[in-house]
Image: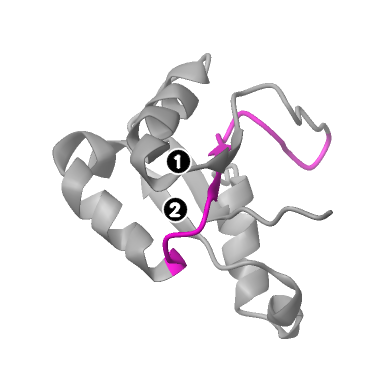
Amino acid sequence: MMSQKTKASRLLELLQSPLNKYLLPQVTIERANWISSPNLQMEKLRILGKVPFAVRSSSRFEDNDNQSNAGKFASFLNVQHGDLALAIDQVFNSYETQTIEDEVLIQPYIQFS
């Protein structure tokens, strides 16, 4: 059986396509890495700058080819750098079924006025 793709993995595929000019940069943090080296994972976020962030759920159990569960798990918008670790923890903790392969997707937050 093919493993279920996550939101982060699907966006990463699109970032490597001609559509990439329409997508925001992203950092994906896996639960195993967050548990073993949270400081290193925070360092990875430097490529996104010091802008506010969108901390988004990216669970294998969120969406699939036959059904969308958009909004099922926690996501946070306009997260300041000092609040990132808490937001990441809260997203991971919102997953009903928790696995070591769980992911959280982090992107710059863009506010339209």
Report the front residue among 26 and 59.
Answer: 26
Q: Are marks 2 and 1 in contact (CB under 8 Å)?
A: yes
- Residue 70 in the image: x percent, y percent? 76, 31
Residue farthest to the bottom, as pictured: 18
Does residue 28 appear to the left or right of 14 in the view shown? left
Report the front residue among 31 and 51.
Answer: 51
60 above or below 110? above
Disc marking residue 103: 1
Image: magenta residue range: 48-66
Residue 91 on the magenta segment: no
Residue drawn at 83 percent across, 36 percent down: 66
- Residue 8 in the image: x percent, y percent? 57, 52
Residue drawn at 64 percent across, 66 percent down: 24
Residue drawn at 50 percent across, 50 percent down: 106
Quarter occupied by residue 6:
top right
Q: Residues within 10 Å of mark 2 (few under 14, many from 20)?
A: many
Disc marking residue 28: 2
Report the front residue among 53 and 26.
Answer: 53
Q: Residues within 10 Å of mark 1 (few under 14, many from 20)?
A: many
